[in-house]
Image (tube, helix red, strand yellow):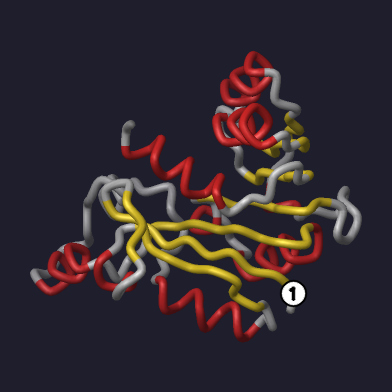
Amino acid sequence: MSSSESVLKQIAALVPAGSRVLDLGCGTGALLDMLQKEKGCTGYGVELDDANLLACAQRGVNVIQLNLEDGLSIFEDQSFDVVLQLETLQHLRNTELMLRETARVGRIGIVSFPNFAHWPNRLQVMLGRMPVTRVLPYEWYDTPNIRVGTYADFEVLARKNRLRVLDSFGIQDGQAVRTFPNLLASMAVFKFDRG
């Protein structure tokens, strides 16, 4: 199993069977497809890219073309059991608003993002350079990431927005990291609700 397949399996394990799911920034729809086939979930993906929309349709994944910067006003409060926002927060201008929208639209939210505090990133910064890694593969001048954050930063943001963290861990090389994830994991994963 590849590292990316392992990550999808770990995220899928956080989603209760039979859930109604909204996947924000769903890409090619791989995770929604897995959730439908393996866990009997239903729902929609939200995606902006035309090629990814086509890939979702070819998989049989329901997808809506929507710019997440415009918010989620088309969805009612608590209209989904789970809202996924995987590796999208760092691309959004209004991260905090989208986090609150995720909590409003879903009973449970699950987010993941590159953890800037991972030790190789810290070392590169100490050596005077912005990090370039497998999870953060771009140079500072051509990155699609608008912002960077850390595992510890998200804990603070969740508290500020009165979100209750139900589970959290890091991921490194496709494996869950629960000991010192802020230091030892390149990706952060949080499952939360409105408490």
> Based on the displayed image, in which of its 4 quarters is residue 158 positioned?
bottom right
Q: Which residue appears at 69% of the width and 83% of the height?
A: 162
**In this rendering, does residue 48 appear at all?**
no
> Based on the displayed image, in which of its 4 quarters is residue 105 positioned?
bottom right
Q: Which residue appears at 25% of the width and 67% of the height?
A: 184
Q: Which residue appears at 86% of the width and 54% of the height?
A: 73
Q: In this view, does 128 lie above or below 2?
A: below
Mark 1 secondary-structure assignment: loop
Residue ranking furthest to the top: 58
**In this rendering, does residue 161 appear at all?**
yes
As shown in the figure, which amino acid type bears the numbered disc 1? Arg
Q: Which residue appears at 33% of the width and 70% of the height?
A: 181
In the rendered view, does 180 fall on the left or right side of 31? left
**Pointer 1 residue:** 194
In the rendered view, does 9 fall on the left or right side of 28? left
**Residue 50 location, x and y as percent?**
62, 23
Instruction: State the quadrant of the N terminus.
Output: top left
Instruction: State the quadrant of the C terminus.
Output: bottom right
Residue ranking furthest to the left: 127
Residue ranking furthest to the right: 76
**Residue 160 location, x and y as percent?**
62, 85
In the rendered view, does 8 fall on the left or right side of 56? left
Residue sitting nearer the eye, 120 or 15? 15
Q: Is residue 179 above or below residue 2?
A: below
